[in-house]
Amino acid sequence: MINHRLLKAVIKGETIARPQEDITQQMAERRRLNRMAERDVGDWLYARFLNDKAGTNTRFAAEIIDVSRGGMRVRLVDNGAIAFIPAPFLHAVRDELVCSQENGTVQIKGETVYKVTDVIDVTIAEVRMETRSIIARPAV
């Protein structure tokens, strides 16, 4: 309603008082809470949808969207779900594995194997319904 009133005043060439600070803060907080709720519901729906695929050989195309010390996050191309691939699923020997968040790369024995924006095939290893998290592994 505030935006509507402001637009109406601008169109009519009228001046209008600036919205009160507490109202704008309340609106920003509600927008933030709505975004969080939407993300939580989305994560829950993805987890429910993929739960029966966990532990199977069903392959999904996934784009690497983030690399961290603990592994990498991927977005499933077909449905947009976010999954995490832990570093031990990438390579068994931790000393030979370098996950660089700064470069967005995963190196094994000094050779870049994965990088952000690569599209790889993954399988769903586990779906944790209590945390709504999807754990994947690269398809072999």
Image (tube, rainbow, N blue to C red):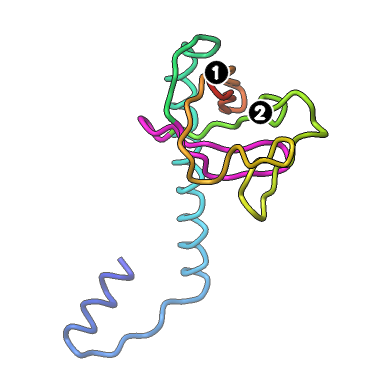
Looking at the rendered structure, the kind of residue marked 2 is Leu
Disc 2, SS: helix
Q: Which quadrant of the rendered structure holds the C terminus?
A: top right
Q: Which mark is residue 140?
A: 1
Q: In the picture provided, is 44 more to the left or to the right than 71?
A: left
Q: CA distance from mark 1 to mark 2?
A: 11 Å
Q: Quadrant of residue 111?
A: top right
**Which residues fall within the magenta stretch?**
62-80
- At x 39% / y 34%, what residue is drawn? 77
Q: Is residue 119 above or below residue 20?
A: above
Determine if the magenta segment contains residue 73.
yes
- Residue 6: x and y in percent read 29, 77
Q: Nearer the viewer, residue 29 or 60?
A: 60
Please name the predominant secondary structure of the magenta segment in the image: strand
Looking at the rendered structure, the kind of residue marked 1 is Val
Identify the residue at the far right of this view.
Answer: 95
Q: In the picture provided, is 86 more to the left or to the right than 93?
A: left
Q: Which mark is residue 67?
A: none
- At x 44% / y 32%, what residue is drawn? 76
Q: Quadrant of residue 131?
A: top right
- Residue 58: x and y in percent read 44, 14
- Residue 134: x and y in percent read 56, 26
Q: Nearer the viewer, residue 49 or 90?
A: 90
Q: Is residue 11 above or below residue 111?
A: below
Q: Residues within 10 Å of mark 1 (few under 14, many from 20)?
A: few
Q: Which quadrant of the rendered structure holds the N terminus?
A: bottom left
Disc 1, SS: loop
> Which residue is under mark 2?
90
- Which of the two discs, 1 and 2, labels the residue nearer the N terminus? 2
Q: Is residue 28 above or below residue 48?
A: below
